[in-house]
Image (cartoon, grey):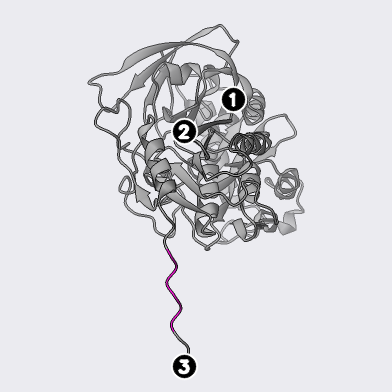
């Protein structure tokens, strides 16, 4: 999930990075082992300058200053965690467009790998990528025949472009013996983040594909429409978050608030005080207290996990499906003076019960598996826990061991509906006093 917090950006960027404007007396001595936030480790700066000069003077081919500095900046972020990245001006604008739900491209959520390749977290519903059969877990090794380099930073830029233009992706897939190419035609991706329909009289279905700026408002409109179609009272509601890669935290919080009368929704904790926040529900359940089942799978990540965790911990919904991705961190976009931005991991989030799902995911109450006829379903070989340099979680297991399964088609929806129809489990009576 991503937050755009300008006050946080200003607070962080106020911290000195280089010593050029500092009083020399305030600069820490080279042999000191610890530094405060206001001091620069001069010995490390000298080491960097020595390497910089060595490359400038002795590398087999000339390298200009800007290229070297860009590489150094990308390297500064590369080893932090998989979600922190430097975005040049164009990439930062594209990121903004994506969060608003409209951009030119192919419609796929990606994760940069250590070797520079891109792993597909999830294709977005009804986009060129989804229609071409690209699926969660695919590895993009080249774009238009050009392979990636490990230190390229944001490598997804070439996927964006003018609607109508073509782009060829070279993909590696577990069940394919060798890499193969897929050519896509870019479109204006206008993400319809919420869709709805009636499954049966009284039983509504809401599909949330991603969390953009207007997703919560769309959710409320679609929910109101379902209630109207049900004659004013829903007998049950299925919320489908399968292969929803996340998005804006605020949208997930607002949707949870629409379904909760009270209780905590999520809290975030980071090193900077402004990163610490707690969100709670306000009175009013827009569904009319309809029973809720949330459908998830291995592609449900970030804000999807926030929503599922909030409804589950408040005993507002049962979770059906497969273990989720396990991305329990918050990224803040920090704008820079030159128009570039830094997308930096600034906090972990915690469900209402105080649990971090970082590198663990949400375990469903009712576990589902792909049907035998599922073409793209199955167990991916990756989770947040398997990503290089991921933040450690409270219950961080070995890479891959927490992987859920990708659940496709209408079978899981039918299973969720059947779960809705089950009578509620009666609470056990309290033991007699005395």
Q: Residue at x 47, y 25 (%)?
A: 59
**Magenta span main SS:** loop
For this view, does 305 lie left or right of residue 139? right
Give the extent of the magenta segment. 426-431
The residue wearing badge 3 is 434
Q: Is residue 73 left or right of residue 20?
A: left
Sooner in the amino-acid sequence: mark 2 or mark 1: 2
Where is residue 383, by image quadrant?
top left
Q: Nearer the viewer, mark 1 or mark 3?
A: 3
Callout 3: SS? loop
Could you say whether the residue bearing mark 2 is in a helix, strand or loop? strand
Q: Secondary structure at mark 1?
A: loop
Residue ID at (25%, 19%): 178
Question: Where does label 1 land, which residue?
Answer: 191
Residue 311: tell me if it is visible: yes
Which percent across, then down, holds residue 420? Answer: 44, 47
């Amino acid at each position: 999930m991503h937050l755009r917090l300008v006050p946080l950006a200003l607070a962080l960027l106020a911290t000195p990075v280089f010593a050029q404007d500092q009083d020399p007396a305030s600069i820490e001595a080279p042999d000191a082992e610890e530094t405060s936030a206001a001091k620069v480790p001069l010995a490390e700066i000298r080491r960097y300058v020595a390497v910089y000069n060595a490359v400038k003077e002795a590398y087999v081919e000339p390298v200009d200053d800007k290229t070297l500095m860009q590489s150094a900046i990308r390297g500064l972020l590369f080893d932090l965690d998989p979600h922190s990245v430097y975005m040049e001006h164009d990439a930062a604008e594209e990121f903004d467009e994506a969060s608003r739900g409209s951009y030119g491209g192919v419609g796929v959520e990606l994760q940069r790998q250590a070797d520079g390749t891109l792993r597909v977290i999830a294709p977005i519903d009804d986009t060129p990528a989804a229609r071409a059969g690209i699926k969660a877990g695919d590895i993009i090794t080249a774009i238009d025949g050009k392979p990636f380099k490990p230190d390229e930073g944001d490598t997804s830029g070439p996927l964006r472009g003018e609607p109508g233009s073509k782009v060829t992706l070279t993909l590696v897939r577990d069940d394919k013996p060798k890499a193969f190419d897929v050519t896509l035609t870019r479109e204006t991706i206008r993400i319809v983040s919420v869709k709805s329909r009636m499954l049966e009289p009284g039983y509504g279905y809401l599909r949330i594909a991603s969390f953009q700026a207007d997703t919560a408002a769309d959710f409320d409109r679609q929910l109101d429409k379902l209630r109207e179609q049900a004659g004013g009272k829903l007998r049950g509601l299925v919320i489908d978050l399968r292969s929803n890669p996340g998005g804006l935290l605020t949208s997930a919080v607002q949707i949870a608030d629409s379904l909760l009368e009270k209780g905590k929704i999520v809290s975030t904790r980071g090193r900077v005080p402004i990163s610490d926040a707690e969100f709670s529900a306000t009175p009013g359940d827009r569904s009319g207290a309809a029973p809720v089942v949330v459908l998830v799978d291995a592609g449900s990540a970030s804000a999807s996990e926030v929503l599922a965790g909030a409804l589950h911990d408040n005993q507002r919904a049962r979770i059906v499906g497969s273990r989720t991705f396990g991305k329990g961190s918050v990224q803040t976009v920090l704008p820079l003076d030159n128009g570039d931005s830094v997308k930096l991991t600034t906090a972990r989030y915690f469900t209402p019960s105080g649990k971090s799902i970082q590198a663990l995911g949400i375990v469903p109450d009712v576990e589902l598996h792909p049907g035998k006829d599922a073409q793209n379903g199955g167990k991916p070989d990756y989770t947040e826990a398997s990503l290089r340099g991921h933040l450690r979680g409270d219950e961080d297991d070995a890479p891959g061991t927490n992987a859920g399964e990708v659940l496709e088609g209408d079978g899981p929806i039918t299973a969720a509906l059947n779960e809705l129809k089950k009578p509620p489990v009666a609470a056990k009576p309290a033991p007699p006093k005395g």
